[in-house]
């Protein structure tokens, strides 16, 4: 079975060393797909990948209350739409069984824009994972590194990423 690491931007590559050192993930030799940020880039980058392939999504995420530098193993992903409620399928993420105490397990909310404020706690926010999961990959794992506490300025200081 094919295996890929999926990351939004080249600047996130530094997280591969952190994941190896801090989580014990040995991903050497696994090809990396850089998708670009957001739904359209995800769909275009991953549309031809076999849905049976194992995908390991690693990337930065914001959180309202997790400490910066916290690793989160995502258990479920949802879209973030705080102003409306509508039925959506549950998008569960495969358990990778990281047993390190410094790894939190939490829900990830994906957005079409950077989240600057939220009442949601004990979760992370990104701009890709829900779209990856919605494509129907059966063996999807995700690890998010908390880069900011819903501050675009702090995110830029750490990542030099999305403008």
Image (tube, rainbow, N blue to C red):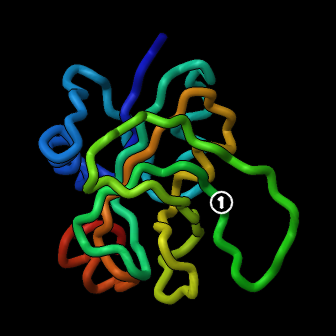
Which residue is located at x 48 percent, y 64 percent? Answer: 126
Q: Position of residue 50 (x, y in %)?
A: 59, 20
Q: Nearer the viewer, residue 42 or 67?
A: 67
Q: What residue is disc 1 on?
A: 78
Q: Position of residue 145 (x, y in %)?
A: 31, 59
Q: Is residue 155 visible?
A: yes
Mark 1 closeness class: few <14, some 14–19, many ≥20 residues within 10 Å = many
Q: Nearer the viewer, residue 102 or 31?
A: 102
Res 47 quadrant in image: top right
Q: Is residue 102 left or right of residue 36?
A: left
> Does residue 108 sit above or below 151 in this rendering?
above
Q: Is residue 149 left or right of residue 133?
A: left
Q: Is residue 134 left or right of residue 126?
A: right
Which residue is located at x 51 percent, y 78 percent? Answer: 121
Q: Is residue 40 visible?
A: no
Q: The residue tagged with tag 1: helix, strand or loop? A: strand
Q: Is residue 55 left or right of residue 52?
A: left
> Does residue 116 sit above or below 33 in this rendering?
below
Residue extending farthest top: 1
Which residue is located at x 25 percent, y 28 percent? Answer: 27
How many numbered marks have been drawn onto this rendered protein structure?
1
Q: Quadrant of the C terminus?
A: bottom left
Q: Nearer the viewer, residue 53 or 89?
A: 89
Residue extending farthest right: 87
Q: Position of residue 133 (x, y in %)?
A: 62, 43
Res 155 quadrant in image: bottom left
Q: Position of residue 101 (x, y in %)?
A: 27, 52
> Does residue 34 sit above or below 153 in this rendering?
above
> Does residue 131 sit above or below 114 in this rendering?
above
Q: Nearer the viewer, residue 84 or 44?
A: 84
Which residue is located at x 52 percent, y 55 percent? Answer: 128
């Amino acid at each position: 079975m094919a295996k890929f690491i999926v990351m939004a931007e080249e600047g996130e590559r530094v997280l591969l060393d952190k994941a190896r050192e801090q989580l014990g993930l040995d991903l050497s030799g696994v090809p990396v797909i850089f998708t670009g940020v957001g739904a359209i880039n995800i769909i275009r980058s991953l549309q031809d990948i076999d849905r049976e392939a194992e995908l390991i999504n690693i990337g930065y995420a914001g959180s309202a209350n997790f400490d910066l530098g916290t690793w989160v193993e995502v258990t479920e992903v949802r879209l973030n739409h705080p102003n409306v409620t509508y039925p959506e399928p549950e998008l569960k993420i495969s358990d990778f069984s990281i047993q390190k105490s410094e790894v939190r397990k939490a829900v990830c909310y994906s957005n079409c824009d950077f989240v600057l404020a939220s009442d949601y706690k004990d979760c992370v926010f990104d701009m890709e994972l829900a779209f990856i999961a919605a494509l129907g990959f059966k063996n999807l794992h995700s690890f998010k590194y908390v880069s900011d506490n819903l501050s675009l300025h702090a995110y830029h200081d750490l990542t030099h990423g999305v403008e």
